[in-house]
Image: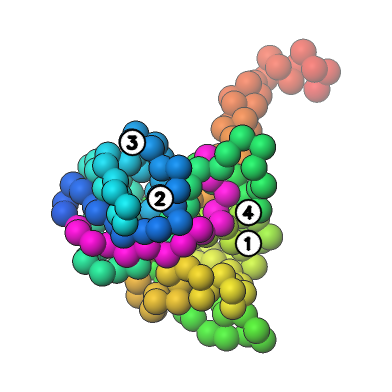
Amino acid sequence: MFTGIVVEVGHVISARTDKLVVGASLVLKELQLGGSVAVNGACLTVTSFNSGSFTIDLSPETLQRTNLGMLRNGEPVNLERPLGLGGELGGHLVQGHIDGTGKISGIFPEGGSTIFSFEAPQEIMRYLVEKGFIAVEGISLTVTGRSERDFRVSVVEYTRTHTNLQYHRIGDRVNLEVDIMAKYAEQFMRAQRSNLTVEFLKGSGF
């Protein structure tokens, strides 16, 4: 489990179809073989590491769901270590299970912040509400507006300059993870609707 608070921006040392080697420093502290680390929001297993980098394997599911297969040597990536038990929840609960990718459709300044807009598929948009949570590239952000096809977030200067959003441009693909509570709510409501029968209504006095 993660919080969506990026610890550092690492860089890709080596990118293969099934493996990434990532240069880092802060996330290497207390790193363990078989432990987890979030790379652009995707929870991945560390298969080896040294004093300046770590290696992760990429499964077909990860490659299908995320933008990690598009990474090239030298590209910046957001990194976060898992949330420790009793640790500070500075963002929101993020599983590191990417739901899919979206595309940056707009970037423009507003006051001291930057507004990013993203086009996303319907299977992601259905879970988004204004003032709800969304993880973009592993960053915990708040939805400030949405339409049928896209949504917007406001990114403060500190967050932009301390994540890989500072390098992103219009048209770039980004990893998206919706709030897990929205999925639970949908499943609960679907189960409730399935029990709504004529017999149930009659038995309830309708």
Residue identifier under label 2: 28
Q: Nearer the viewer, mark 4 or mark 2?
A: 2
Residue identifier under label 3: 33
- State the CA–CA distance, disc 4 to disc 1: 10 Å
Q: Tell me which amino acid carries mark 1.
A: Thr
Mark 2 Cα-neighbour bin, 10 Å: few <14, some 14–19, many ≥20: some
The secondary structure type at the circle numbered 4 is: loop
Q: Is residue 168 visible to the viewer in this orientation of the structure?
A: yes
Q: Nearer the viewer, mark 1 or mark 2?
A: 2
- State the CA–CA distance, disc 4 to disc 2: 21 Å
Q: Tell me which amino acid carries mark 4.
A: Gly
Residue identifier under label 4: 91
Residue at the spot 56% in from the left edge and 42% down from the top edge: 83
Q: Tag on residue 55?
A: none
Residue 167 percent coordinates (x, y): 39, 76
Residue at the spot 35% in from the left edge and 75% down from the top edge: 171
Q: Nearer the viewer, mark 3 or mark 4?
A: 3
Q: Earlier in the sequence, mark 4 or mark 1?
A: 4
Magenta region: which residues?
1-15
- Depth order, front residue of 151/82: 82
Q: Earlier in the sequence, mark 3 or mark 4?
A: 3
- State the CA–CA distance, disc 1 to disc 2: 28 Å
| Residue 194, picture quadrant | top right
Q: Is residue 67 visible to the viewer in this orientation of the structure?
A: no
Q: Earlier in the sequence, mark 2 or mark 3?
A: 2
Q: Residue furthest right?
A: 205
Disc 2 + disc 3, Cβ < 8 Å: no
Q: Tag on residue 142?
A: 1
Q: Earlier in the sequence, mark 1 or mark 3?
A: 3
Residue at the spot 43% in from the left edge and 69% down from the top edge: 164
